[in-house]
Amino acid sequence: MHEYPKLRNILGAVFSVETGLSDTAQEAMLQRSLLNSEWRAAFQQELYSAASDPQTSWLELLSNDEYEVTDADSEMEAREIAMSLLWQTTFPDQSIPQI
């Protein structure tokens, strides 16, 4: 399994329940991060790769020993939650890859 360090970083720093940001503030922080073209390219590659890989554990990406975004009941639910948080802001003109 891939580690996805940028994806983990943004989920832990911006979207975790411990951070406590509002939905609006979370989106603004992601948008601000995406302004850095080097970071954006690496993050887009990671997010696209994770979204395209059926082996990605979205449950683990959203809840692990380091942070918790939410507690989903299934991999599909966890993937849907992650995509709702990240995809549209990161890839506004692209559809989410089917797995």
Image (tube, helix red, strand yellow):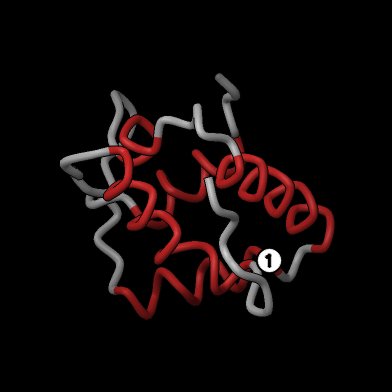
Percent x, y of residue 74: 23, 39
Q: Does 43 sit left or right of 66 as displayed?
A: right
**In the picture shown, does residue 93 fall above or below 21?**
below
Viewer-proximal residue among 28 and 92:
92
Q: Which residue is mark 1?
A: 34
Name the residue located 67 percent from the left edge and 72 percent from the top edge. Answer: 94
Residue occupying the far right of the picture: 38
Q: Does 9 sit left or right of 58 as displayed?
A: right
Viewer-proximal residue among 43 and 38:
43
**Given the image, on which type of amino acid does mark 1 rest?**
Leu
State which quarter of the image contains the N terminus. Answer: top right
Percent x, y of residue 70: 22, 48
Percent x, y of residue 79: 38, 48
Q: Does 1 sit left or right of 25 as displayed?
A: right
Name the residue located 23 percent from the left edge and 52 percent from the top edge. Answer: 17
Viewer-proximal residue among 30 and 45:
45
Q: Does 53 sit left or right of 40 as displayed?
A: left
Quarter of the image holding residue 40? bottom right
